[in-house]
Image: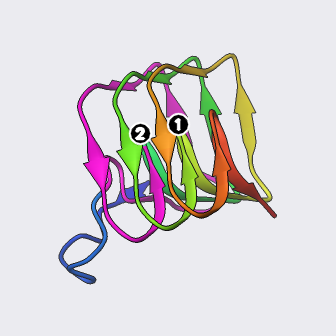
Amino acid sequence: MLRDRRRQRGKKRRRAGRAEPWGAVARCYATGAVSGYLELGGLIGLHRDSTVLESFATGVVWGYKHLGGLVGNNDMSVVNDCYARGPVSGFEGIGGLVGRKA
């Protein structure tokens, strides 16, 4: 199950919002830029207890903390057969595919 938290927190902008526990994101993609402050990804911002399979993102991601080309914050989750293209810029917890792995 995917939830979009943009309405709950105005400063966060991301594609899928967050992936809920025990859910799956499969064969998805996103293009375009994402900007904001925390937990930003080209496809998913917060990825918790779930799986991403065969997905990709190609946009620019910029913000402050926990930024990734595909997933911003990957908390006890699986990312398999995925890729990200495009620059990621920020200040803390930054990665080309995943910004933070907890």
- As drawn, is 54 to the left or to the right of 14? right
| Quadrant of the image containing the N terminus | bottom left
Q: What's the residue type where badge 1 is placed?
A: Leu
Residue 38 appears at what percent x and percent y?
47, 71
* Residue at the disc numbered 2: 42
* Badge number at residue 40: none
Residue type marked 2: Gly
* Along the viewing direction, whichever of 5 and 40 lies nearer the viewer: 40
Q: Is 36 left, or right, of 66 in this rendering?
A: left
Magenta residues?
14-41
Q: Is residue 34 magenta?
A: yes
Q: CA distance from mark 1 to mark 2?
A: 5 Å
Q: Is residue 44 above or below residue 6?
A: above
Q: Earlier in the sequence, mark 1 or mark 2?
A: 2
Of the 4 image quadrants, the one containing the C terminus is bottom right
1 is within the stretch colored magenta: no
The image quadrant that residue 54 belongs to is: top right
